[in-house]
Amino acid sequence: MSKIRIAIQKSGRLNQDSVQILKDCGISIDNGKDQLKAATRNFPMEVMFLRNGDIPQYLRDGVVDIAIIGENVLVEKGKDIDIAERLNFSKCKVSLAVPKDMEYNSIQDLEGKRIATSYPNTVIEYLKEKGVSADLHQISGSVEIAPNIGLADAICDIVSSGSTLFKNNLKEVEVMLTSEAVLAVSPKISEESKEILAKLQFRIQAVLKARA
Ligand code: PRP
Ligand code: MG
C-alpha cells in the first residue's frame, strides 16, 4: 500500500506541536534521534524532518506530498502552494520594528532606510503596496541585532511573545501579516495520496474540534 509523505520542521518552534498533532490523530512516529526520515505506526505515512525554508521547494517538486509549515513561510516562498487546513498553533506575526527611540509616524518614515530581514519577498511586496522604497539586507537569523550593530535602521521578522524585540530595544511599528501553522499540499500529489490526505484531514478536523 502506498504511503503519504509528510514534511515537518526538523527543529524549531513548529517541531513539537507538529509531532503532537500527528500523535493526537493517533499516528505515532518511530523516530530514532537524529533520523531525518521516519516511519509511522497506525497510518500509511512517512515523515521527513526538514528545514523550514526548504519545505516549499520540496512540495513544489513533489518530493513530499504534504507538510506542516508556518503560513509565513508559504507567503514568503510558496504562494503557489495550496493550504488544506489551518492548524491553530504556532501563531505569530511578521512585523516591521524600529529602535525604540526612533520617531515613527507612518511607513513613509522608512523611505530610503535600510531594513534587515529574513523575509525579503514579504517586505518588498508590503513596501510596494505602500509606495515606499527601502534598501533591503537579507540575513538568515538574529535579525533583531541589526540596528544595534549599525547594519540597518529597521528590521522585519517574526514576532511571537515580543520578547526578542523588547530585549533588543526595538518597537513593533507595522504588522505585515499574521500567521499560524497550516497543512500544505504539493501540486504534484498523486490520486492515491489524495485519498490518504482526506483520511488525515478527517482526523485533524476531529482533533481541532476537540481542542477548541
Ligand atoms: C525567532 C524570530 C524572532 C523570535 C520571535 O527567532 O526570528 O527573532 O523568534 O519570538 P519572540 O517574539 O517570542 O521573541 P529564533 O529564536 O527562532 O532564532 P533565529 O532568528 O536565529 O532563527
Ligand atoms: Mg530570531
Image (cartoon, rainbow, N blue to C red):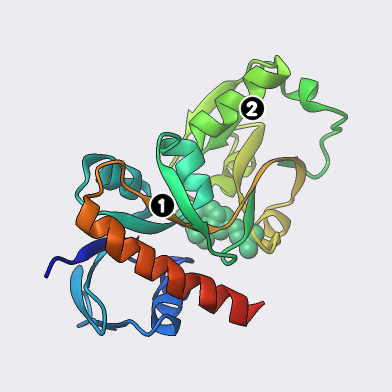
The residue closer to the viewer here, 24 or 155, is: 24
Q: Residues within 10 Å of mark 2 (few under 14, many from 20)?
A: some
Which amino acid type corresponds to the residue marked 1 in the rendered image?
A: Ala
Q: Which residue is mark 2?
A: 126
Can the viewer see residue 181 in this picture?
yes
Question: Horizontal and vertical percent for residue 102?
Answer: 82, 35
Asked whether, in this view, residue 156 is left or right of residue 171, the answer is: left
From this view, report whether residue 100 is shown above or below residue 166. Answer: above
Name the residue located 43 percent from the left edge and 66 percent from the top edge. 201
In the rendered view, would you say 27 is above or below 186?
Answer: below
Instruction: Depth check: give the residue in front, 48 or 3.
Output: 3
Residue positioned 53% across, 46% down in the render: 72
On the image, the x and y values in percent for residue 148 come to 63, 43
Secondary-structure class at tag 1: strand
Q: Which mark is residue 159?
A: none
* Amino acid type at image mark 2: Tyr
Question: Which residue has dot 1 on it?
Answer: 184
Label 1, ligand 1: CB separation under 8 Å: no
For marks 2 and 1, give the CA distance. 23 Å
Q: Would residue 85 be found to the left or right of residue 149 on screen?
A: left
Q: Residue at x 37, y 85 (%)?
A: 26
**Horizontal arrangement in the rendering, residue 108 relative to residue 54 (left or right):** right
Q: Quadrant of the N terminus?
A: bottom left
Q: Position of residue 103 (x, y in %)?
A: 86, 33
Quadrant of the image occupied by residue 173: top right
Q: What residue is drawn where x is 29% and y is 46%?
A: 59
The answer to which of marks 2 and 1 sits earlier in the sequence is: 2
* 151 relative to 187 in the view: left or right: right
The quarter of the picture where residue 202 lies is: bottom left
